[in-house]
Image: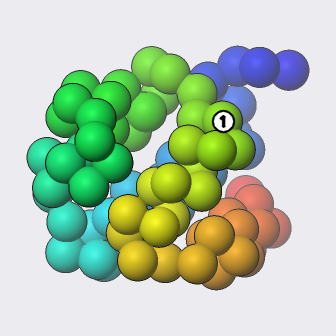
Amino acid sequence: MRSLHTAEYVAYVEVLIEARKSAGLTQQELAKRLGKPQSFVSKYERRERRIDVPEFMAIAVAMGIRAKTLLSRIETALKHR
């Protein structure tokens, strides 16, 4: 299942959005840290594109959060769905 609209993927993206905001970063600031255009962040936050594992790792680093911590937050969010 590769849908961008499953409850699991929605929870995944919501965790990424909350982490970005908690890090005090705008989409533009995160995109700059990633060396990507702002539309990259916007598209995955609106669930218009999927994030693969290397991108996930880069996003975590750019936000200053361990990928393991983000995965734990995603796991918790999925348990509450």
Mark 1 packing: few (<14 Cα in 10 Å), some, or many (20+)?
few
Q: Which colour scheme is used?
A: rainbow
Whether residue 11 is situated above or below residue 3 in the rendered picture: below
Looking at the image, residue 76 sits to the left or right of residue 64; the answer is: right
Residue 17, position as x, y percentages in the image = 38, 56
The quarter of the image holding the C terminus is bottom right
Which residue: 47% across, 67% down? 61
| The quarter of the displayed image where residue 3 is located | top right
Task: Farthest residue to the right: give it.
Answer: 1
- For the residue pair 75 and 23, the one nearer the viewer reads as 23
Residue 42 visible somewhere in the drawing: no
Which residue: 28% across, 42% down? 35
Residue placed under numbered mark 1 in the picture: 52
Which residue: 40% across, 77% down? 64
Residue 5, position as x, y percentages in the image = 61, 26
Residue 39, position as x, y percentages in the image = 24, 26
Looking at the image, residue 55 sits to the left or right of residue 80; the answer is: left
Looking at the image, residue 55 sits to the left or right of residue 23; the answer is: right
- For the residue pair 40 and 58, the one nearer the viewer reads as 58
Residue 6, position as x, y percentages in the image = 70, 31
| The quarter of the displayed image where residue 67 is located | bottom right
Is label 1 in a helix, a strand or a loop? loop
Looking at the image, residue 65 sits to the left or right of residue 10; the answer is: left
Which residue: 50% across, 54% down? 58
Instruction: Name the amino acid type tagged 1.
Output: Asp
The quarter of the image holding the N terminus is top right
Whether residue 10 is situated above or below residue 50 in the rendered picture: below
